[in-house]
Image: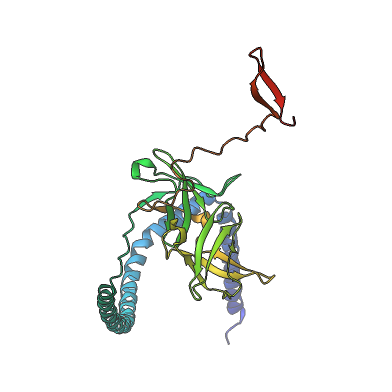
Amino acid sequence: MVSGKPSKLKSFKSSRNFNFILILLCLSLVFLGKLDLIAIRNIKGFLSDFLAPITYALNKPVKEIAGVFEDVKSAGSLREENIRLKSEIRKLNVINSKASSQEHELLELRELLKVLPKRKNQIITARAITAPGGIFANTVLINAGKDYGVKIGQPAISPLGLVGFVVNVGIKTSRIILIIDINSMIPIYLTSSNWPAIVQGQSGELLKIKFLSSKAKPIEGEMVQTSGHGGKFPSGINVGKVVKSFSGNFYVKPSIDFQRLTYISIITNKNSLPIFPKSFQGFAPLQKPKSSISLKGLNLSGKRIIESKEN
């Protein structure tokens, strides 16, 4: 019969060894917690540097495969885009052929009717060197003057429409008064109904419509262009569009954002008509009232007799 004492002894020794290992592990963790964190960070950095090439080598094939799938996907979208562009090109070719035939027809009609051709505008473009606005007037300064042929009265435009006209010219700079200034009055016409009128600046965002016929019925959103009346501005320059206020009155909203003006073009071969004739020397001063005393004849001694008109 085998005694059970050796088995109990073995279980006691195994449990003691387990407890010893557990205690040793706990002490190791405490010891590691007390170590300098800089050394641990250095070890982590070393491991990261060591594993980085391996990680890159493993990720590169994955990225290449993903790129292949992306190229296949983009190739499909490019094929659809190519088909769409070919369709657009066919449409543009049709429109271009129609425009060419209409242009040829227009030239024939001009020749038939003996219409005078429009004078081609000579334009120079300058940069705005001051912000729009001022204390007394809404003006802007550009870096072009007499050396570029700029003269007073010439129109100033931008790709969006009319900016204003030149009011002062120096050798290297010129000052332009904007159409929103209260001193600016522009002859215009309503493009839909062809009614002429004049717009005046109000030193604000909108232009006031003046001298519009009572028979005219402006349409909200209707485009407004220069009429060319008076010869101050060329005809057909975009000014803005008609807007309706809450009170029911119609105004013109300029098509240009004057706070974002960067480049301004001057039509240098367009001189506005002078306000006064060349012989004008200024207004005559007020005349003094004539005296009520007049001179009449001589007396016997040869002296001139002074009498009043009443006598």
Outermost residue, right side: 310
Q: How is the image coloured?
A: rainbow
Q: Position of residue 114 (x, y in %)?
A: 28, 71
The residue nearer to you, when weighing 73 against 81, is: 81
Counting labels gives 0
Above/below status of 100 relative to 158: below
The residue nearer to you, when weighing 187 against 73, is: 187
Q: Position of residue 218 (x, y in %)?
A: 57, 74
Q: Quadrant of the C terminus?
A: top right
**Residue 75 vs residue 154: left or right?**
left
Q: Position of residue 20 (x, y in %)?
A: 59, 64
The residue nearer to you, when weighing 13 against 87, is: 87
**Residue 138 vs residue 227: left or right?**
right
The residue nearer to you, when weighing 46 against 165, is: 165
Outermost residue, front side: 300
Q: Residue visible at 30% across and 81% down? A: 95
Above/below status of 205 relative to 280: below
